Amino acid sequence: MPRALSLEQLAEESDSEPELLRRLVGIGVLRPGSHGRFIAGDIIRVEAARSFLDAGLSFDDIAAALDSGLFTFEFLDRFHPEPAPRSGHTLAQLAALLGVEGDVMTSVYLAMGLPDPTPDHLLRTDEEAILADFVATWGVEPETLLRAARLIGEPARVVSEGWARLFVEKISEPLTASADRPMDDRIAVIALTTEKATRLAPEMLHWLLQRHMRQAIDQVNIEGFEQTMAEHGLSLPSPTRLPAIAFVDVSGYTSMTEREGDDLAVRTSEMVRLEALASARANRGSLVKILGDGVMLHFDDVTDALTAVLGLIGTLGTQGLPAHAGIHAGALIERDGDYFGRTVNLASRVAGQAGPGQVLVTSEVARATEQSGFSFEQAATVALKGIAGEVDLFRVSIDAQGEG
């Protein structure tokens, strides 16, 4: 049952002055019920209205938009869960209880992409609980806390901002501009679709995080298993055919998208996906997954991998997308269509050593394909992160043609 709040309680819960709330009641942002009571959802309306005012809009501007039916605060509490009560602790007080330096906890808050809380800002019970669990999981060492905060905060921010902008572009703006139905109907449709989107995003993130966490834990466990075996002089059985993993990335992708914008990033990613899929299928391989500016490919035979990747690099180059790649061949562990183990890890590291237009391979790949008509030259001997010992890398001629 929604909590009923007096005006004074609503002011405290929303960190607002009572006079601000009275003015919001006056222009119709807030609509108290019987006995002048408010609901917890009104906290969301107050915070939204205050952000409008902070952005430079006036009470008169907001009132005019409400009176004309061009905007409404009515549906906002349908888009977000009811705010939890205040815990009675500030962030600094919670930090002291958890044994974390106060300024470190503030940095953690900011690293998650959240606004800097004022010194007297009281946390809500749900955020206090999640922050306590966060510290209990990662400990009190500042660098670890900040890294964990950034890793979880940045993707959440990107998803939230991206979905909101996509929603405006593809749903709310076209509906608002449409003149074939009354404005009230259009706003109702926008509100209903917004509610679905805001409920779907956390559910999808939860589902996807579970899937990715399962794969990530499997990967580190498998890599640790292989490392332990190697340290004890053991090795995995050699496969009868030599499968391969290839990583192909667009060179200079980050600087290119910073210059040209997110639209180019989307088009580039889709172009790479389509070309990679076509090249893999034409050479008896598969596209395992898209990795932002690149792809991970799997092949049952290393010769097919080399043929496909050389063709893909050449095709992307003709379309103005300089790319580079790394290939390694060896034993693989497959689960649910994904691949794990040292072979995958090494292929990824090799790709990171390649420059624009280059295809770098390990000695295993060079030996396995030297009779297939490919041309190699030794590029370097390097130490790669997470890989025991030094690794010999070979550069493949970009116009080399395999025979099989």
Image (cartoon, grey):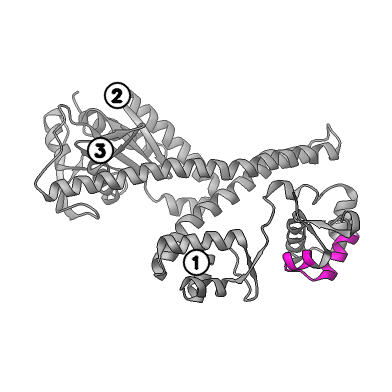
Determine the CA span between mark 3 and mark 1.
Answer: 46 Å
Q: Is residue 157 visible?
A: yes
Residue 380 position in % (x across, y down) = 16, 52
Q: Is residue 14 visible?
A: no
- Left or right: residue 340 versus residue 263 is left
Give the extent of the magenta segment: 9-26
Q: How many marks?
A: 3
Residue 80: assigned label: none
Residue 224 position in % (x across, y down) = 24, 49
Determine the CA span between mark 3 and mark 2.
Answer: 20 Å
- The disc labelled 2 sits on which kind of residue? Arg
Residue matched to label 2: 284
| Image quarter of the C terminus | top left
Q: Secondary structure at mark 3?
A: loop
Residue matched to label 3: 398
User: Residue 11 magenta-drawn?
Assistant: yes
